[in-house]
Image: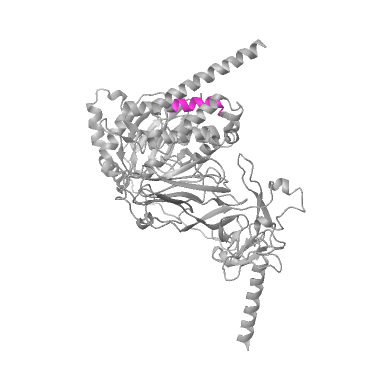
Amino acid sequence: MGMLLILLLSLTILVVLLLRTIAAQSRPNCPNKCKNVNVTIPYPFGTREGCYLNELYFVNCTNLKIFKTSIKVLKISADGDLRGLVPISHRCYNKHGYETSSEPRITFSRFPLSSSRNVLTTVGCDARSNIGLAYGDGYITGGLTNNAGCNTVKNGSCLGMGCSQVPVLYNMTSIKIHTKRNTNVTVGKWRFNNCTYGFLVQKDHYKFHVTDLYKMQRRYFPVVLKWSVGNTSCEAAQTNRTMYMCTENSICIDTQTECDQTYKGYRCQCAKGYQGNAYLPNGCQDINECEEHLDDCLYGCTNTIGNYTCSCFLGHRGDGRKSGEGVGMGIAASFVLTLIVYGGLKQRHIMKSREKFFKMNGGLILRKLLFESKQSSQMAKIFTAGVLEKATNNFHKTNIIGQGGNGTVYKGTLADKTMVAIKKSKSIDRNQIEQFINEVIMLSAISHPNVVKLLGCCLETQTPLLVYEFITNKTVFQHLHEYGNISSLTYERRLKIAMETAEALSYIHSTTQIIHRDIKSSNILLTDNYTAKVSDFGISRFIPVDQTHLQTLVHGTLGYIDPEYFRSGILTEKSDVYSFGMLLVELLTGRKVFSHDGTQSDLGLATYFVSSLVSGCLIEILDHEVKKYGLHDNIKKLARLAEHCVELEGRKRPSMKEVKAELTKLSQYLTLTLNSLYCLTDQS
């Protein structure tokens, strides 16, 4: 009898929970699913009249398509994501050279494509696909595969050999994808596969297979759209409570708009500690956090509205969580720690370790090269570990001035009061020690006003320490993106920074044959008078005079990496040109090249910038400090130069010498223009 009561009680609780879930998804008396299809349709979407917000949110159960869209719904999430299937575009040729193609127009109604969650994928050998507006002329951006034929393609690889992927544009609500061969088809001579394919797909939801080169015409792929409600911002919507969609225990989040202003709105989300549908009355229900966070508590867990609390053991107080600091009231515990001093033994161990690392890191080779050098006074200095430890207070965290994927940079003060920046690398390739030493010698010999001077190194630590001159005025990244610094970079200063960076890169390309490989705003330091200094040659590579390129593993910073180098692994001077182009885009727009917050800059700033330039919306994406000048010829020319630098194909990009020359002209022209304005002002 007791077991029966327990079973009935459990079933009752289950039914209540299920009813609550249903109520939290759809309006009363409205189905939240189509028959025989396991896809939940939450309000404001609905499957029949009276169950959806308006007809744009109507889901047709016959084909699972949303009103006026081409997408077949897979999932609608409360967080504003809508996943669905879209068709592929293709173009095929027969042995006589005739072609057949299918390039469907894909419409998303008011729900734009997520640029951070999708990629444009091209499949084929020597193939290209381009994406554009469904009912407009021309194509804005695209991807291409290499022209090495089909012999080198591998399963799973989408880096240019038979398959490539590039970011997509922002807020596109209707598209067409055009596919074609890069080279002409020769009748009867097939060097490549006979079809090219182009399609949108959610990131990490397509894995290339060699057989895809021949059989993909009728396939569909998942994409992610962003959905919202209303046509105003949260602030504007909240002024009209009868029209405001967000219900109790929820928050309102603005959706982002672009320069054409065709897409506005907001979305509702349950507040922290609640879950459900924020568009329905009582749709956001309290979460019992104790079911999820019980292990976080030292003793016991109590659920509260929107949160939870942890209990302490008897006789203790505190927050009761394992991460907290419980303090005993009744029992005072004392621990006596005995320090054993090893004295001379410990010091001897340290000295032996330093001597071992010095030899492993090429110290003997460097010492020999410095001894033989006729310009040893200008060459790298070998610092001891003790000197640098003293300079940085034993590398105390308060002296950290920069951190990245390659290592940490510390501020230090030498005994003679010289300020230095000390870079501690995360690792070093032991097979490249001799090359590392040669590059230290070469970099220390570089004397250019726009390159941070390498003073020397320390080889007595597990990974070598590099010692640079200390630059006082932070990085370009900090001035562009950190609150309180942004207004410091006027357009004049931005153009000056661009010109000086170009001068440095042109110099190292032509004089030292070094490719920097990691040009980005956080590697451009500024002096007190805003002179640019290129820094961090940690992953730079030297190209011998008789070579034009190197085949390497791909290194760099996402967003700045040359797409051609990313696909092929072939490093050239034009790889630095692409990265520099992204720096120009960053200076013009004030947007981060890459961010993890899903904003417009995420993974696609180059595409977004070029498309805005082509569509005449440049003024809308310029940074506020740049807009102060209006859209005059100087800014337009700088934008065009940035566009040329970020061309997908390296051969179409200018050299850094050409970039330097163009920036010098723009700088001189701007100076003359401003001087003329000052003269007119004085005369008036």
Residue 58 placed where, x, y %? Answer: 65, 59
411 over 313 or under it: above or below? above
309 over 500 or under it: above or below? below
Q: Residue at x 69, y 50 (%)?
A: 230
Please name whichever residue, 635 or 144, is drawn nearer the observer in this view of the structure.
144
Q: Is 450 part of what is drawn in magenta? A: no
Q: Is 500 part of what is drawn in magenta? A: yes
378 on left or right of 502: left
Please name whichever residue, 334 or 257, is drawn nearer the observer in this view of the structure.
257
Q: Residue furthest top?
A: 683
Please name whichever residue, 490 or 134, is drawn nearer the observer in this view of the structure.
134
Q: Is residue 366 visible?
A: yes
Q: Residue at x 46, y 31 (%)?
A: 525
549 over 666 or under it: above or below? below
Please name whichever residue, 599 or 148, is drawn nearer the observer in this view of the structure.
148
Residue 167 placed where, x, y %? Answer: 48, 46
